[in-house]
Image (spheres, helix red, strand yellow):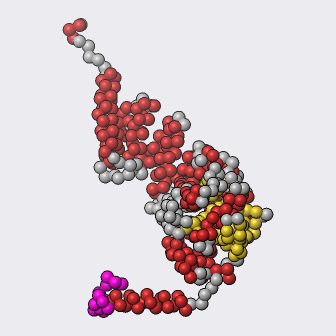
Amino acid sequence: MLGEAGEGLTLKQRLERLVAAAGARERARLTAPHRPLETLVPAREIENERGRFLLVEESRALDAMHGDVTLSRLQAIAPRSVHVLSGDRDHADFDLSRAVFVDTETTGLAGGSGTAAFLVGLGFIEDGRFVVRQYFMRDYDEEPALLHALIDDLARFSDLVTFNGKMFDIPLLETRFRMNRARFPLEIARHLDLLHPARRLWKARLESCRLKTLESALLGVTRVGDIPGEAIPQAYFSYVRDREGGMMSRVFEHNRLDIVSLAALSALACQWIEEGRAEDPRDVLSLARVLERAELYERSEDEYRRVVASGNDIDAGHVRLSALVRLARRRKRSGDGPGAAALWEAAAREGFIPAFRELAVYHEHARRDPETALLAVEEGLARLGGSRVGTSTVMSRDLNARRERLRRKVGDCAASRAPRRKNPQLR
């Protein structure tokens, strides 16, 4: 590298070496066999009133496997499952089998009016098959024709699925349509951005919720020779310059896999909602939270109990405690004081300091037993110094103030129960 001083070369010698290497790469590029894109992908040129562009269309049987999943599951998903998954009440009748799955490849990753979508991929079910249709502009002057063709295809859909599309793909397409004085045909469509539900379901177990990570971990799909996303803009610029289709054909395959994986993951996520397919305690806890968020309390409590029953080993201890706390709060909100207290006691045994406060409140106000409430506070304070689970300065102040008040209350109770001495002067 330029900044390295290896082999004792002078700065001039290192610069000369870099120039020579760059020249060699350029000569290799110029002498490499030229492969037109149309010979590498099943593309056909489309012409409309706004110009020309390339269209690639492929389809597959719905019962064909994509990793461990078949896309036929899209037809079996109940619309309510999408509503539960997303938490959006507008998705109450969202139909994945009639949705369009959208993914774009762009000239930049930052967005903005200077970024264009040179490849727009759509996936949808049609005539019993899953179709992937890709719209490609060979140069910037083909964008109007590409967008014009998209209008007719997208206008027939009222449900849209993307992966991080609310932040990137859809705003970018809206901008490109607006700059071309056209209305974006999906502007009122219901939009499921799978990134956010995926994080709620799987982030606790998986280090990353990137699409490629999810498809590998959940679908069993491993890409071979995939082009990195950050390299795609430069691949397009190179294609515009020299029309060599080798690298661009890899971009088409990358986009196709993104769309098919997006559809398969959408079906799988909804299947988890419907069937409770989670097995890892971290996934079970995440599923329980999603169900609770959708106010499916009985089902969520069943999943929390599954976590509690999973044991308290090193790996499962934290998620088990979280499930205990969630269950205890649910019992408390439903008015089941004794049931909540039993769960708070289990959480307290695992060192969850706020559980001692909850026990003190229960014993003082529900059972009218300030002595037991004081014992709970004392134990909580005793553990507070050496525990980092659920502790805070606010909790410390609360327990200390509660202890002083309960001590006075216990003292007053003891005094009221003590037998009164007779005044000897009154004899």
- State whether residue 123 appears in this view: no
The magenta segment is 1-13
Residue 144 in view, yes or no: yes
Q: Residue drawn 63% across and 50% down?
A: 188
Query: Is residue 50 part of the magenta span, yes or no?
Result: no
Image x and y of residue 65, in percent: 70, 70
Provide residue 408's location: percent of width, then percent of height: 29, 29
- The residue sitting at the left extreme is 425
22 in relation to 174, above or below: below
**Which picture quadrant has residue 374?**
top left
Q: Which residue is rendered at x = 60% and y = 87% of the image? A: 34
Q: Nearer the viewer, residue 128 or 134?
A: 134
In the image, 302 versus 165, the foreground residue is 165
Residue sticking out furthest to the right: 127
Q: If the image is split into quadrants, where does the C terminus sit?
A: top left
Which residue is found at the position 33% from the left and 35% from the top? 402
The answer to which of 319 and 179 lies nearer the viewer is: 179
Q: Is residue 127 left or right of residue 92?
A: right
Q: Quadrant of the N terminus?
A: bottom left
- Picture coordinates of residue 48, whole percent (x, y): 71, 66
Q: Residue at x 49, y 43 (%)?
A: 328
Can you give x and y, in whole percent of width and height, for residue 128 in the image?
78, 64
Report the front residue among 101 and 401.
101
User: Is residue 126 depicted above or below 418 in this figure?
Assistant: below
**Numbered marks: total:** 0
Left or right side of 6 for 104: right
Residue 2: in magenta span = yes
Q: Name the side, left or right, on which 65 lies relative to 12.
A: right
Residue furthest top as drawn? 427
